[in-house]
Structure formats: structure tokens, C-alpha cells
Amino acid sequence: MGDIEVPESHPRYQSLLTRHRIEAGVEKGITSKQGLIAEGRGEAFDYLLGERTLDSADEAERAAAAHLLLARHPVVSVNGNVAALCPAELVELAEATGADLEVNLFNRTEERVRAIADHLREHGAREVKGLAADERVPGLDHERAKVDADGIHDADVVLVPLEDGDRAEALGRMGKTELVVDLNPLSRSPRVAAVPIVDNVIRAIPNVTRYARDLRDAPREELEAIVEAFDREAALADAERAIREGGG
Ligand code: ATP
Ligand code: MG
């Protein structure tokens, strides 16, 4: 990404930078071609949301941090888009919350799982799960169901950025608390989440980390109160309102 030439003064600087990261991810074997399409969708929704974090998304990010801190076994699921967009930020989030990082791909190939795990390690990850793939999520076809027995399969709380709807529903049926980052408030994945975070992952992930650091020493009761107070329906409705009213 170092050789891109987008002037910082460009009004859509951040969005162009994001696009370049995804392109570089495809070249590096991290992001799939379908990931390019997902990026396009994300850009369209981010544009409609004004390319900024709504107050309701900020609240969701705080609630997500509280969930991760309260969890017995939190896992951050990593796909080819988020690995390309914010690898170091994912590593920081995992460290701030004690979560595992697990590579979990919609279009799984062993090469891509390894490339993403290597990429995360290059960005400071010590342990990356998803290579064992020795368990299944019930109700999904074979390749899409693969998870680690001591990773997502065992987790009680899973942060899934850009998960597809089928898998989000299947994880929900397993009784997991899902924290979903997705710019489309109408997509099934955020609609089945305990905490739908309608925001760009490049803004959402560092903000969840910031809240996790703030709340690190908070008593459990305070974290539980944050989780209780969060209203998922209101968060989704606010994102829809923002899109209708244009940019915020
Ligand atoms: P389903 O109904 O199964 O969820 P879908 O239409 O959401 O299907 P996908 O292509 O898997 O299908 O969707 C990718 C999702 O990821 C889109 O909702 C898009 O808005 C979102 N997305 C893409 N890039 C980002 C990003 N950088 N940050 C947050 N969300 C993103
Ligand atoms: Mg979706």
C-alpha cells in the first residue's frame, strides 16, 4: 500500500485508501475476488452514512467492548477483507480484550487461511487460530462450517466483522453472542446480532479497542449495565434513519 498516490486533500481520501488496501489484499492472496464486491457494497453504504461513525454506532462499539471484556472466551473472527483493511488494529483489539484471533473464511482455501494468518503475525499477532479447522458449525455446508474446536466453536462471544447472513444465523443458533460489524443495517448479519455495529471496520475496530482499554478496570456490574442498556433495535433504526436523511 506504500506506493499509492492519493493526495490527503482529496475529499474521498479515506475511501480511496481503503479501496487500495483491498486491491493490495487481493494481490497478496489475502482477499478473495468476492471480497472486492463486498468492499463495493460497503463503500456505497458508508457514503450514504456520511463516512463517519454515528452516535448510535459509537454506543454499539462501547457495548461490544463490554461484551468482550465480560466474556469467558471471546474470539475475533477474521476474514480476507478485514485482514487487508486493519490487521494491526485487529491484533490490538485481541490484546486489549484477551480475545483469540481466528481466521474464518466464507470462501475458504488453505492457502488463503495461511496467508491471512501470516499477515496477522507480520502485524504482531502471537497466536492465530483457524488453521486446525477441527470442528463444525451445525447447519452449514462443509467448507463454510469449519472452525477451531478451541476457537469459535468454544467461544461464548464472537466479534464477526462482515459475516454473511447464513453463518451469522448459524452461530446464533449455537447460542453465541454475536457482535457484527456491517455497514448495511438491512443485511441479515447485523439483524441477527446481539450488537449490530453499523460502521466501517476501519473506524469500528479501533473504537472498540479504545473502549475496551477505558473499561478494562471497570467492575463487572458496570460492564453488565452497559450491555443491558444497549438497544439493538434502536441502533439499527438509527442507522436506517441516517441513510434516509443523508449522512448522519
Ligand atoms: P447476507 O444477506 O447473506 O448478509 P450480503 O448482501 O450482506 O448478504 P456480502 O457480500 O457478504 O453479502 O456482504 C458484505 C457486507 O459487508 C455488506 O453488507 C457490506 O455493506 C459490508 N461491508 C463491506 N465492507 C465493509 C467495511 N469496510 N466495513 C463494514 N462493513 C463492510
Ligand atoms: Mg451481509
Image: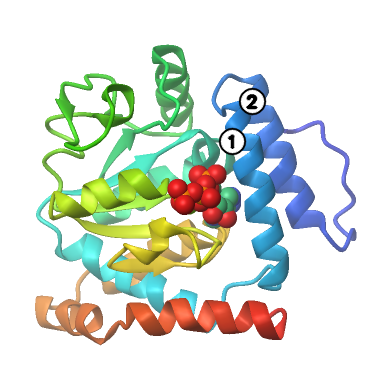
**Quadrant of image for the C terminus:** bottom right
**Which mark, by number, is residue 35?**
1
Q: Is residue 248 visible?
A: no
Write the residue at 61% across / 20% down. 28
The amino acid type of the residue labelled 2 equals Val
Asked if disc 1 and disc 2 are in contact, CB closer than 8 Å, the reply is: yes
Residue topped by disc 2: 26
> How many circles with numbers are drawn on the protein?
2
The amino acid type of the residue labelled 1 equals Gly
Percent of width and height locating residue 10? 89, 58
Image check: 165 left or right of 244? left
Task: Please tell me how crowded label 2 is: few (under 14), some (14-19), or many (20+) other residues with Cα within 10 Å.
Answer: some
Q: Which tag is nearer the camera, tag 1 or tag 2?
A: 1
Image check: 13 left or right of 181? right
Task: Please tell me how crowded label 1 is: few (under 14), some (14-19), or many (20+) other residues with Cα within 10 Å.
Answer: many
> Label 1, label 2: how many angstroms apart (C-alpha)?
8 Å
Write the residue at 65% across / 63% down. 45
Of 96 and 164, the residue lying toward us: 164
Write the residue at 26% across / 55% down. 97
Helix, strand or loop at mark 2? helix
Percent of width and height locating residue 184? 55, 62
Q: Is residue 218 visible?
A: yes
Q: Where 239 falls versus 42 (above or below)? A: below
Residue 11 figure quarter: bottom right
Q: Residue furthest top?
A: 111
Residue 197 figure quarter: bottom left
Image check: 220 left or right of 99? left
Is tag 1's residue or tag 2's residue first in the polypeptide sequence? 2
Percent of width and height locating residue 40? 69, 47
